[in-house]
Image (cartoon, coloured by chain):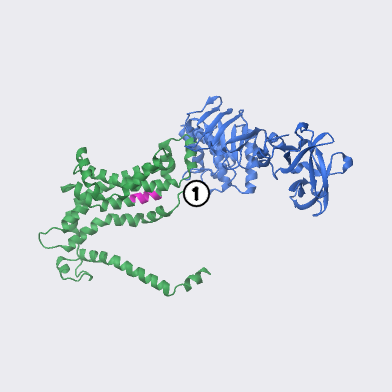
Amino acid sequence: MAALELRNVRKTYGNAAQEALKGINISIEAGQFLILVGPSGCGKSTLMNAIAGLEDISSGAILLGGEDLTGVEPKDRDIAMVFQSYALYPTMTVRENIAFGLKIRKTPAEQIAAEVDRVAKLLQIEHLLDRKPSQLSGGQQQRVAMGRALARRPKLYLFDEPLSNLDAKLRVEMRTEIKLMHQRLKTTTVYVTHDQIEAMTLGDRVAVMKDGAVQQFGTPQEIYNNPANLFVASFIGSPPMNFIPVALENHEGRPGVRLDSAGGSVCLPLPQLASNLADGREAVLGVRPEQIGLGRGQEAGGPVLEARVQVVEPTGPDTLVYVEVNGVQVCCRIAPVDTPAIGSNMLLELDIERLVLFDPTTGARIA
Amino acid sequence: MADSLSRKRLSFNRIAIHATLLVACAVYLVPLLVMLLTSFKTPDDVRAGNLLTLPVEWTLIGWVKAWDTVQSYFWNSFMITVPAVIISTFIGALNGYALSKWSFKGSNLLFSLLLFGCFIPFQVILLPMSFTLGKLGLANTTAGLVLVHVIYGLAFTTLFFRNYYVGVPDALIKAARLDGAGFFTIFWKILLPLSTPIVMVSLIWQFTQVWNDFLFGVVFASGSAQPITVALNNLVNTSTGAKEYNVDMAAAMIAALPTLLVYIFAGKYFVRGLTSGVVKG
């Protein structure tokens, strides 16, 4: 296992006006699990192919275990990859699929057999070894594809949206299994996905990408709690963060934002906001659904907002309640026992410490 | 439900369709029937003039004489066809693989130019080709004829394989590259095992083309090296002696037999190979 470092990686396709990768800088330690997440067309797959050596980069450097991979052929990079389509060799049995890379590298036969056994046991596919890929279900093919990657014990694993062809239930199962496997084997891994839940649950480090640039690089918690900009805040989290248009103002000498709803108007103090910014300008207030709780009334301390309940969606573990604040729909996640009646007014309390503010035009974080 | 529906359809339309097909079938098969019947007749029987009657006396003398005459040319044709078919199919597969999976600068242009080869009439290249063969020292040799057929066939075989391999997922190639396989390993171990249907198409197509070729054979081969198509022509067109139609017909049947057999035994692959998708991702 080896550390991976991307230094100012750039890529332009042919004569395209737009760069596909605009100077990517990412560095992870050996054994870490890196997630590249973003909407389609953000460059995450291009970046993965560049790491694998399947596509050349225009400038910059990719270092694996301190060694510069520029100009190194894919077969010499000692990298294994799991593809979205699995890409199992259709004419070979599962055993031959797993052994293929070892055979090409002229590994002795008994060592290949031992390695196939180890991997098959690890992934519980021993009973499938003599079948052809076409005789396997999607989940089984997925396991074989992982087995093929695991067999060579390479320096780096690449996963290209490996779960997106599975049904919802299997996807969750395999996600846990991949996580378990990584905890056991401590393999350096780069994992591409467009699914923010996979990004949050699997990654040690997450790089959120958009338009060929990294928007934010950090731990899942950092990215969730402390999004660098409006895009990251909107992309990570389900249900997504609420964005409420507000005006920044001073209320009794303290900077804050005003929230209006059916039940009245309240000025929310924001201690994290620099007071020189509170000059009446527009901003976007970011609030995650779970940061809005049931208000306990004025005496409990924080300011309370009264809003009319428009929609109630019970999901089981908690209930999503939609209310209107400052003209937009706001989603609140509350305990099922507190579920209000539709059309009634409910008291809401916001977790002031964790609120974030963005510039409405640039999307940059203000506070 | 489906059964009763289809039974209802056995109406006027169905009958008309089948009748048309039967007539078409007869139109195509009657000449073959005449050939077969004639080949088993004695010369006197033939001269009696009843084309569609059964032979008065079934005899193999036509076939024996025909075989004696064309035997060596029949093997000539094999010596030309087998290498030409195998070589052009193999190179076509390699071309198709390179053009579809290792696209390089100008690969699309190269493919378009190759396609152009499908539309060049034989007659156009006769003179430059005989000049080239002369320069290569291959004029009037079997090897020369093989070379001509390989070059002429490449346009088609490349087209077949290129279009087939375009349907093979790129991820398969990427996976193999990461597994450590190079250009030829991927070709031998991954792509060729997938190629049975299109190899069949290429083999049948090329076999038919090369075996049935007359023009290249008559121009680029001479004397005892001629293929059976040319020999058949010489046999039928001899102006000396009485016309032995039974021998002519038997010789024509012998000349046509290999392509017939190829279609009978591999024909199902031809349709399957041209219509089937390749591999599911």
- The N terminus of chain A, quarter of image: top right
Q: Is residue B277 left or right of residue B149?
A: right
Q: Which residue lies furthest to the top in this view?
A: A66
Region of the chain picked out in magenta, as a range? B197-203
Colour of chain B in the rendered structure image:
green
Percent x, y for residue A119? 56, 37
Callout 1: SS: loop
Would you say the magenta stretch is mainly helix, strand or loop? helix
Q: Which chain is blue?
A: A
Check disc 1 and give the amino acid type: Lys
**Residue A40 position by quadrant:** top right
Q: Is residue A208 left or right of residue B211?
A: right
Q: Which residue lies furthest to the right in this view?
A: A299
Q: Which residue is drawn at 76% across and 42% down?
A: A290
Percent x, y for residue B114? 34, 45
Q: Mark 1 points at which residue?
A: B280
Q: Residue furthest bottom?
A: B12
Is residue A172 part of the magenta span, yes or no?
Answer: no
Q: Residue at x 26, y 64 (%)?
A: B32
Up/down of B260 relative to B193, above or below? below
Is residue A201 visible in this depiction of the protein?
A: no
**Depth check, front residue: A270 or B4:** A270
Up/down of A2 relative to A339, above or below? above
Percent x, y for residue A280? 76, 38
**Depth check, front residue: B43 or B26:** B26
Is residue A44 visible in this depiction of the protein?
A: yes
Q: Residue at x 58, y 47 (%)?
A: A165
